[in-house]
Image (cartoon, rainbow, N blue to C red):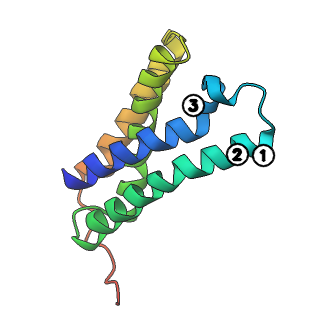
Amino acid sequence: MKTVLLLTCSNIFMTLAWYGHLKFKFLEGKPLAVVILVSWGIAFFEYCLMVPANRAGYLSGTFTGYQLKIIQEVITLAVFVVFAWLVLDEKLRWNHAVSFALILLAVYFAVAFKSGPPPAVGN
């Protein structure tokens, strides 16, 4: 649960870094270099959460690398759907919903079956 919570918080920062500048009023008319620097500043916090999430999930033996990546992708999409609806004022269309459902199915297949322990990690 700790891993999923950290991944969710990380993805909120990622979505703000990647797409927030499209709606941030204080960035209107600013040079692209300024927008990039602001986005990098926000993304720093994404990494501060993403790295511990992946380490905790992997090194504890709870998730494999594949499982972490697939879970991260579905969290990314869930966060983005909320962001697109609330901030970008975009509606979720049927084809997007079907695509999202297929990705959820991928998460199920990634975590529902035991694939053996992850490889040992040396310190």
Question: What label sits on residue 36 in the rendered view?
Answer: 2
Q: CA distance from mark 1 to mark 2?
A: 5 Å
Question: What's under tag 1, amino acid-wise?
Answer: Ala
**What secondary structure is found at the residue carrying circle 2?**
helix
Numbered-mark total: 3
Residue found farthest to the bottom: 123
Inspect the image, locate mark 3, and give the three-letter code of the amino acid beneath it: Gly
**Residue lying farthest to the front in this orientation:** 26
The span from disc 2 to disc 3 (Cα, nearest Å) is 11 Å
Q: Nearer the viewer, residue 94 or 7?
A: 7
Q: Measuring from the top left, give residue 78's x and y in whole percent.
A: 40, 30
Q: For the point 22% across and 63% down, which residue is it? A: 62
Q: Position of residue 38 (x, y in %)?
A: 63, 44
The residue mark sitting in front, 1 or 3, is 1
- Look at label 2 and name its amino acid: Ile
Q: Are marks 1 and 2 in contact (CB under 8 Å)?
A: yes
- Location of mark 1 (residue): 33
Q: Between residues 15 and 55, which one lies in front from this camera angle?
A: 15
Residue 20 is marked as 3
| Mark 2 surroundings within 10 Å by alpha-carbon count, few (fewer than 14), some (14 through 19), many (20 or more) | some
- Which badge, 1 or 3, comes first in the chain's sequence? 3
* Quadrant in which the C terminus is drawn: bottom left
Residue shown at 36%/35% (left/top)? 105
Query: In the rendered structure, are the residues bearing label 1 and label 3 in contact, judged by CB atoms less than 8 Å apart?
Result: no
Q: In percent of the image, x 28 and y 73: which residue is there?
A: 59
